[in-house]
Image (cartoon, grey):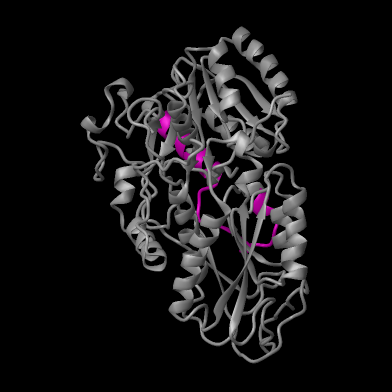
Amino acid sequence: MTHGVTTGGRARRRFSGGWCLIVGFVIAIALSGCGSGVKGSAPGSPAPATTPGAPLDKTLGAGVTASTIKLGVVLVDFRQITQFTDLIRTDAEQKQIYQAFIAEINAKGGIAGRKIVPVYHFYSPLGSAQILGLCTALAQDDNVFAVVGTFVDFSGDAQTCIAKQQHRVLMTFNLTKAIIDRSPPGLIVTAGDLPERSASILIQLLKQQNTLTGKTVAVLGDTSESTVVNETIVPGLRNMGVHMGSAAILSVGTTGDTTQAQAQLDSFIEKWKTEHVDAVWLSGDLASTKQFVEKIKAALPNLLLMADNTDVLNQAQQMQQSGVRPNPYEGILAAGGLTSKEYDQSANWKYCAAIYQAQTHKVAPDAEHTIKTPAGKINDINGTINDACQTLTMFHEPTGSTPSTISGPSRTGARGRIHRCTPVSTRPTTTGGSRPTTRPSEIPASGRRSLPFRTSRAASGDARAAPRQHRPCLVARHSLRGGGRS
């Protein structure tokens, strides 16, 4: 029996480390009302809709009182998946970090004058049973106003339960457009990128550089990414005129048992050989985990790999630190943004690090350094700080100055104002443009390519912690990265 799970995340998926990719799809929702002192609605009850000219409903949202607002904080219990990952987060440190940012908000007046009262839950991402149970508990037992953290269910059922069935705001990572579209607009929010957007950016960069000219390209994803594969990646590559091999959709699941998926991949590898495939696009976090990439590169060692997620660079880092040679992720291409050093010097990180240090009296570990546990695992404190900072800052800023009442979201979205965070730029950065690119000296010799986009190799160079994939929406710069430098 073969086991595997994607953790980091971002067991997130996209909640593990990865290179920064900020896009103009970051959405914050401001839920405001017009009165105070009214009793809150019953747990799970939908907020009434409003019509133009009708008296405004002054009912407080679920989990909101005159002085408090209850917030569910849901985090992965890495103790239950430690055998599957080299990157971990401890329950105590995750709670301390989220609490630090909540304390900062409360010290500055809270949300519309109300203090955040957090309710913490930890769960195993193996299967959906625990997280589906949390959906009911958070809404009906805890009666929270909103849910933040690493609330991840690759099937999308748990996210839909929170937003569509229980009518609570969800701010998390590892989302797809298909998952978001199941629920009313504005109720599922992410500080990160969506795979559809990441794929479109990577396709644009590959086209500009003619990277796939003369190649036969196959696509590998899992069932949770099938919509991304079939509606974004495959059509995008065909529109480029790329010669296509077979697209493979694996039945990975989240139980940890990948026996069926491994057998499926064996069959596709043999098919790719007959199709003379020499490039494979990895879609999503599950299909790009080490066990699948190792098998692919063992059978097709000269294959060019591409990925629409930057967690592959974190996977490469783990292989590097484990002494795996050759590293199967060597040379992988992904759309990325700031390097670790650039992000550590950014206003985004300085803002988050300052709050962490003020509240915990400890220096925030940056993205350029790896913290190892006694067991040899990578302790992703940096990633947790970024996750907490992003989601809680986004939760606070649209509502923090709103007077009086915080209303619950209606099923029609009548009382939800959606604000889109507009980044500095969403255009790819080239050497011919007005924005600077990485200097050639910053590109390891072994990873140098004829691409004017930023490149790096996740398997060569020092073993440093990869930066978080999701950053507060201050910077947007896209580049084509070669995997290898962690």
Q: Position of residue 248 (x, y in %)?
A: 66, 24
Taking the magenta stretch, the answer to whether it contains residue 204 is yes
Q: From this viewpoint, is residue 153 visible?
A: yes
Return the residue found at the far front: 374
Residue in front for this viewpoint, 217 or 175: 175
Image quarter of the N terminus: top right
Percent of width and height locating residue 204: 44, 35
Q: Residue at x 66, y 47 (%)?
A: 178
Is residue 122 toward the left or the right of residue 330 in the image?
Answer: right
Check the image and name the residue furthest to the top: 274
Report x, y in % for residue 249: 68, 28
Q: Indicate whether 204 appears above or below 270.
A: below
Q: Which residues, given as a range, are shown in magenta?
A: 179-207
Query: Quarter-wise, where is residue 135 in the image?
Result: bottom right
Give me the residue at 37% from left, 55% from top.
Answer: 364
- Residue found at the far bottom of this picture: 37
Question: Which residue appears at 70% of the width and 69% of the height?
Answer: 412
